């Protein structure tokens, strides 16, 4: 998908997730043109609330949801038991970091985009 891909598990009802969204937007704006892609996997059950949160938080990258909350098959595949949870993948699709935030995440993304 790119030099780096962030898979972000979140939900509209998750306050910590919503608080983190502006940081994810900033990362996308700073690094998408250099090879960062983001895929957000919502663990929502209500499609209207999910779509409303996407619009309010200005999440312009790929968004997916099976509307099955914590029983989402993607979340189960990745072993997600709480949100927010993130996985950073390199260009080959290998998971290189889990749950990095802030400057630690930014540094790791910059490494992958070299």
Image (cartoon, grey):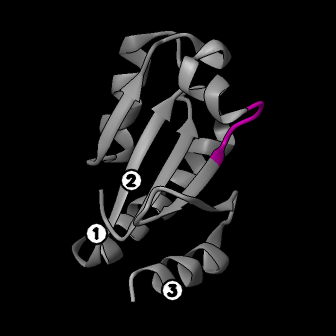
Q: Which residue is mark 2?
A: 38
Instruction: Give the secondary structure at mark 3.
Output: helix
Alpha carbons under labels 1 and 2: distance apart: 8 Å
- 22 vs 65: above or below: below
Q: Is residue 45 magenta?
A: no
Alpha carbons under labels 1 and 3: distance apart: 14 Å
Name the residue at 56% across, 18% down.
73
Name the quadrant of the C terminus. Answer: bottom left
Closer to the eye: label 1 or 3: 3
- Where residue 74 sits in the image (x, y, percent)? 54, 26
Residue 111's label in the rendered image is 3
CA neighbours of label 2 inside 10 A, class few (<14), some (14 to 19), many (20+): many
Which picture quadrant has residue 103?
A: bottom right
- Where residue 83 sits in the image (x, y, percent)? 69, 37
- Where residue 106 sits in the image (x, y, percent)? 54, 78
CA neighbours of label 1 inside 10 A, class few (<14), some (14 to 19), many (20+): some
Residues at marks 1 and 3 touching, judged by CB atoms closer than 8 Å: no
- Which of the marked residues, 2 or 3, is nearer the chain's N terminus? 2
Q: Which residues are magenta?
A: 80-85
Alpha carbons under labels 2 and 3: distance apart: 16 Å
Q: Is residue 81 magenta?
A: yes
Return the residue found at the far front: 92
Q: Which residue is mark 1?
A: 32
Name the residue at 51% across, 86% down.
111
Name the residue at 66% across, 45% down.
85
């Amino acid at each position: 998908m790119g030099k780096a891909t962030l898979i972000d598990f979140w939900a509209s009802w998750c306050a910590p997730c919503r608080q983190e969204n502006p940081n994810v937007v900033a990362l996308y704006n700073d690094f998408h043109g250099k090879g960062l892609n983001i895929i957000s996997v919502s663990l929502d059950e209500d499609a209207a609330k999910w779509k409303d949160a996407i619009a309010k938080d200005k999440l312009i990258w790929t968004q997916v949801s099976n509307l099955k909350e914590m029983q989402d098959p993607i979340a189960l595949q990745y072993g997600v038991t709480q949100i927010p949870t993130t996985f950073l993948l390199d260009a080959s699709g290998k998971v290189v970091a889990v749950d990095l935030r802030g400057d630690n995440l930014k540094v790791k993304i910059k490494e992958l985009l070299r």
